[in-house]
Each structure stands twice: as structure tokens, then as C-alpha cells.
Amino acid sequence: MISLTDRARSEIRRILVEKHADGPTMGLRVGVKGGGCSGLSYVLEFDAAKEKDQVIEEAGVRVLCDPKSYLYLNGMTLDFEDGLMARGFKFLNPNAKRTCGCGDSFST
């Protein structure tokens, strides 16, 4: 399962309301793609669910993940930081054996 912190849920809701008029049908797609300094990079985008997606609904927020990415992201928690030193989503992935300094890529 992919979990969201309260801060992440709040930011996802804010973006959906602000930028996506069709928000109730949209979800946050979380995935991975090849590349980045550690081998795999995280992908975040708003999208509609596809047929084979894992769909996780948590407190009114939908998280979508394709089956291949789910192998790497199962058990992950998505957080959101909004501080002086950093602003953005943070991936807390127990499957990552190595991450880069920016936190956007990992290897297993």
C-alpha cells in the first residue's frame, strides 16, 4: 500500500481544487521511470485511473499506481514539506536501498 501523510493529502487537495476543475475524477499518479543518478526516478502527475492501476483512496484523495511501479513503491509513504529549506513532496520508500542527495531517484 502507498500511504499519505496529512500534509501530503492537504497539498494534493489544494492542487486539485486550484488547477483541476475535474478534481473528483482525478488522482495523483505515483510511479517510477528509469533514469536519475541512482537508477530509478519518481514520477508524480495528476491523471485519471487506468484499467490495471492500483487505486488507493485515503481520506478523499486518490492515489494511482501502475502495476510495474507498484512493485517498487508498495509500502512507501508520501509526505509534503513546506519549510525554509525545502518545499515539495518527499518519498519515504522502504524499498530504496540507495537514494541520491536530492531524494528524487533511488535504486533497489
Image: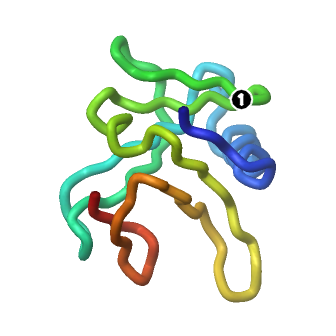
Residue visible at 46% across and 45% down?
45
Is 103 in front, or is 51? 103
Residue 64 appears at what percent x and percent y?
49, 30
Residue 20 appears at what percent x and percent y?
62, 36
Residue visible at 76% across and 79% down?
83
Q: Quadrant of residue 27?
A: top right
The residue furthest top is 51
Residue 98 appears at what percent x and percent y?
34, 71
Please tell me whether mark 1 sits on a helix, a strand or a loop: strand
Q: Badge 1 is on which residue?
A: 58
Vertical side of 81 occupied by 67: above or below: above
Vertical side of 46 occupied by 92: above or below: below
71 left or right of 5 in image: left
97 left or right of 10 in image: left
Q: How is the image coloured?
A: rainbow
Vertical side of 81 occupied by 83: above or below: below
Residue visible at 73% across and 49% down?
5
Picture quarter with the N terminus: top right
Residue visible at 60% across and 49% down?
77
The residue furthest bottom is 85
Three-letter amino acid code of the residue under disc 1: Glu
* Circle 1 residues within 10 Å: few <14, some 14–19, many ≥20: few
Residue 17 appears at what percent x and percent y?
74, 39
For the image, the number of numbered tags is 1
Picture quarter with the C terminus: bottom left
